[in-house]
């Protein structure tokens, strides 16, 4: 902003948020804060849209707070420049920004003052519906003749698409424009009047009274958030929602306290440094052993199939592994400090040695192996500190995974030193250490080759949103369940890095194993670039062939094939521009355009190693009665496997009349699965993120809707968080047009599914309420996604009495 009279700038002024909208730049895992309250003004109930966030104070108070804040800082006559205006209203498209800027300029002086901005926000937030409708009509009526023609509507819808991060071709835009124009133009005169627009909006239930303008201003940092979070962790609801985790944590702490007390008691006649050091030593004996138990993946997978899984928080074993590492560090510091203190007290008086000689040599002859206790203690501290620092997330996620991997291999030296250092440690370590060694041998490459033979990546698909789909040869003797995960190593990328990925194929698919990997870190980005830059010949460069594989065992996307000249290049080099060929009548896109849309498919032969499978909480899916599969983004991968497995299990009981074409399904026995209903909820940020999984979902819909199909056994709920809600003045036209197309064609234009993609985030209170009314048995929610979103979902599950099962993401 620039000052009109005072010369003061508003660009660095922190402005409190007016109305928080589902913004394009807001991360998907932003914490959802409940449901929207009904607001009253002038005796009329103004219930907000289904996907809006709840506000702690009314919109009227927010606008008043904004007005007071700006008036105090810069005054009501301060001008707002066009760039700041766009950022404040969170408008991305220039057409809408220009129209808003012009209409907000109430005194027609070609500038917008703070007072005009506040006044307009107030009218479009809490004003009467007729005023909001009038504003919307003026936005669309660009030439100001009192009517909206089809060209103006097309321009407005194109802007709505930009605001909602929707990318459709000109044909789809024309289809949307025609559908909305025909619906609104009641008198068929080729123009839409204000009354006709009002009539079209009123035909949408609840839309007229909920119109608003989603606005996001620069937020002032809040200091109350941390306090609120700490308060939440000590709240009753948190304790009730995390009983197993809290009970296990409490048991671990209490056990360490008991061991510390026992260690101190055993040496109660010694000086106070030895008393504390021995107490810490006994705790270290336990913790340095227990940290091994927490990483026995084979044993943990076996425990999932037992009743122990209902008591122990098996899904949090990595979290407790890290927590135990913190306890080891704490006791190591205290244990070391006390022994140094003891050395100061007794080195000269009892051993006639200096403190450095006492600590760094074996001359004191302390310990059960050649007086090695003090020196081994020093070496242990050095080794553990190196391991501890190099296991921090800033090392692992900064492209230095090899540093983490090799320093973590120091656990071998660490345990050897512990056995030499502590007289009784070998007794603690004997059983868990033996189990760990057996697991490591069982998971070694030598054993894998003996057991599984060689495994290869035979096909790679580079999909939208930088998702790499790998098709791997599955050994005949490898058994897994839907939702399991494996560790993958590709020597061509990194010889010693193993990374866990959920299996996205169903066990019934035979000799193929699917992995879908999103590029989110150093190794996953290297994986994507490795196959993109590989110097083999890329075949069939050319037109989109529209190939969709038959059956569930093939690739889940419509593949784009290419044809190109052979190029000789280094893996780090970008491929040169290739000569493209096309069939007559086909539209040829540039290679870069094809790549950006993720349409690369090619056969390969790349050696890899697979370690697993390992179980997750999803293994209980077929024991549930009514399952809700809720995921965000790439968290859909375990449910890709589960949904396919469900269809295979139903198809095993599919029957066809030998005398006619009648098809039906026999009842699936309970030992196969107990499921009576499945709700699949997928939350994605933008339209492109849906593309790679749409083919499978389309098949599921076809299987349910065909003659003798499953009916509504699986209900799908798709949400696109970047899209503006229908009630938002910046997105209303697009959403109305998409609704009309969906009603006419029984198809969602964004995904091609029968299921309509909803804009924004789910209103979990309403959605879970509808699920609860179906009465299909006890509801279990299986969640895979962001931890913050999982917290919100878990709270709603508690409200409705649903079971909640979370998979680590």
Image: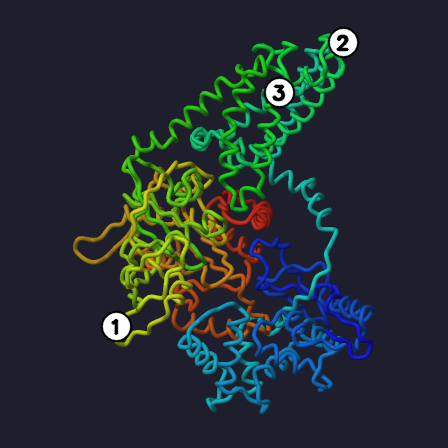
Kindly identify the residue that appears in the image at 45 percent across and 74 percent down: 740
Position of 40 compared to 583: left or right? right
Task: Specify the farthest residue to the left.
Answer: 659
Q: Nearer the viewer, mark 1 or mark 2?
A: 2
Position of 552 compared to 248: left or right? left
Judge whether residue 800 can be spotted in this image: no
Q: What is the secondary structure assignment of the residue under circle 3?
A: helix
Pointer 3 or 1: first along the chain = 3
Q: Position of residue 270 (x, y in %)?
A: 73, 10
Q: Which label is found at residue 377?
A: 3
Q: Residues within 10 Å of mark 2 (few under 14, many from 20)?
A: few
Q: What is the secondary structure assignment of the residue under circle 1?
A: loop
Q: Position of residue 658 (x, y in %)?
A: 17, 53
Query: Which residue lies under the disc numbered 2?
Result: 349
Q: Position of residue 405 (x, y in %)?
A: 49, 36
Query: Which residue lies under the disc numbered 1?
Result: 583
């Amino acid at each position: 902003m620039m000052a009109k009279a005072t010369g003061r700038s508003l660009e660095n002024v922190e402005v409190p948020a007016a109305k928080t909208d589902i913004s394009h730049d807001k991360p998907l895992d932003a914490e959802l804060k409940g449901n929207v309250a009904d607001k009253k003004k002038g005796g009329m109930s103004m219930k907000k849209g289904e996907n809006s966030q709840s506000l702690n104070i009314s919109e009227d108070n927010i606008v008043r707070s904004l007005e007071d804040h700006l008036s105090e800082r810069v005054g009501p006559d301060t001008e707002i420049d066009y760039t700041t205006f766009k950022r404040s209203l969170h408008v991305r498209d220039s057409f809408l920004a220009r129209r808003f800027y012009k209409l907000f300029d109430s005194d027609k002086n070609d500038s917008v003052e703070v007072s005009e901005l506040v006044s307009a926000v107030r009218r479009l937030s809490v004003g009467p519906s007729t005023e909001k409708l009038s504003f919307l009509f003026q936005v669309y009526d660009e030439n100001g003749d009192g009517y909206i023609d089809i060209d103006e509507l097309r321009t407005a819808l194109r802007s709505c698409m930009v605001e909602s991060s929707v990318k459709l071709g000109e044909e789809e835009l024309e289809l949307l424009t025609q559908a909305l124009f025909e619906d609104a133009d009641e008198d068929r005169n080729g123009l839409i009047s204000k009354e006709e627009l009002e009539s079209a909006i009123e035909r949408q239930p609840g839309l007229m009274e909920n119109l608003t303008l989603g606005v996001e201003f620069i937020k002032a940092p809040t200091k109350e958030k941390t306090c609120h979070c700490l308060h939440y962790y000590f709240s009753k609801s948190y304790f009730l929602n995390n009983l197993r985790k809290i009970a296990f944590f409490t048991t671990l702490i209490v056990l360490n306290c008991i061991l510390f007390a026992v260690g101190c008691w055993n040496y109660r006649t010694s000086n106070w440094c030895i008393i504390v050091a021995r107490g810490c030593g006994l705790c270290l004996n336990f913790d340095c052993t227990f940290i091994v138990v927490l990483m026995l993946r084979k044993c943990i997978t076996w425990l999932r199939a037992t009743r122990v899984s209902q008591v122990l928080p098996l899904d949090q074993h990595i979290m407790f592994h890290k927590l135990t590492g913190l306890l080891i560090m704490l006791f190591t510091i205290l244990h070391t400090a006390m022994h140094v203190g003891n050395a100061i007290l007794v080195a000269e008086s009892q051993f006639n040695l200096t403190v450095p000689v006492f600590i760094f040599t074996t001359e004191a002859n302390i310990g059960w192996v050649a007086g090695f206790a003090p020196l081994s203690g020093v070496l242990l501290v050095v080794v553990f500190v190196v391991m501890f620092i190099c296991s921090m997330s800033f090392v692992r996620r900064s492209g230095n995974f090899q540093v983490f991997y090799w320093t973590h291999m120091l656990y071998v030296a660490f345990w050897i030193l512990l056995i030499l250092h502590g007289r009784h440690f070998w007794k603690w370590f004997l059983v868990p250490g033996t189990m760990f060694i057996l697991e490591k041998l069982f998971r070694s490459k030598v054993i894998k080759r003996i057991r599984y033979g060689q495994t290869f990546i035979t096909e790679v698909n580079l999909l939208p949103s930088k998702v790499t789909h790998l098709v791997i040869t599955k050994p005949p003797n490898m058994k897994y369940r839907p939702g399991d995960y494996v560790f993958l190593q590709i020597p061509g990328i990194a010889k010693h890095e193993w990374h866990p990925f959920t299996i996205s194929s169903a066990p019934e698919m035979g000799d193929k194993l699917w992995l879908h990997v999103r590029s989110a870190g150093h190794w996953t980005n290297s994986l994507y670039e490795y196959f993109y830059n590989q110097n083999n010949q890329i075949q069939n460069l050319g037109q989109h062939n529209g190939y969709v594989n038959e059956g569930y065992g093939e690739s889940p996307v419509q593949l784009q094939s290419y044809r190109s000249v052979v190029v000789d290049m280094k893996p780090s080099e970008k491929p040169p521009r290739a000569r493209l060929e096309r069939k007559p009548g086909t539209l040829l896109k540039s290679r870069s355009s094809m790549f950006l849309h993720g349409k690369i498919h090619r056969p390969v032969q790349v050696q890899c190693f697979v370690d697993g499978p390992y179980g997750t909480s999803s293994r209980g899916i077929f024991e549930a009665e009514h399952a809700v599969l809720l995921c965000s983004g790439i968290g859909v991968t375990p449910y890709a496997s589960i949904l396919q497995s469900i269809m295979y299990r139903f198809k095993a009981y599919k029957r066809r009349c030998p005398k006619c074409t009648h098809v039906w399904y026999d009842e699936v026995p309970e030992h196969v699965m107990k499921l009576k209903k499945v709700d699949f909820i997928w939350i994605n940020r933008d339209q492109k993120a849906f593309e790679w999984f749409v083919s499978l979902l389309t098949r599921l819909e076809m299987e349910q809707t065909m003659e003798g199909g499953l009916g509504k056994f699986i209900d799908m709920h798709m949400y696109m968080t970047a899209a503006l809600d229908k009630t938002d003045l910046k997105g209303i036209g697009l959403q109305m047009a998409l609704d009309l197309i969906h009603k006419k064609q029984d198809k969602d234009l964004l995904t091609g599914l029968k299921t309509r993609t909803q804009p924004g985030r789910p209103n979990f209170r309403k959605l879970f309420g509808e699920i609860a009314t179906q009465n299909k048995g006890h509801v279990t929610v299986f969640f895979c996604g962001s931890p913050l979103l999982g917290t919100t979902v878990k709270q709603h599950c508690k409200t409705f009495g649903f079971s909640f099962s979370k998979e680590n993401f």
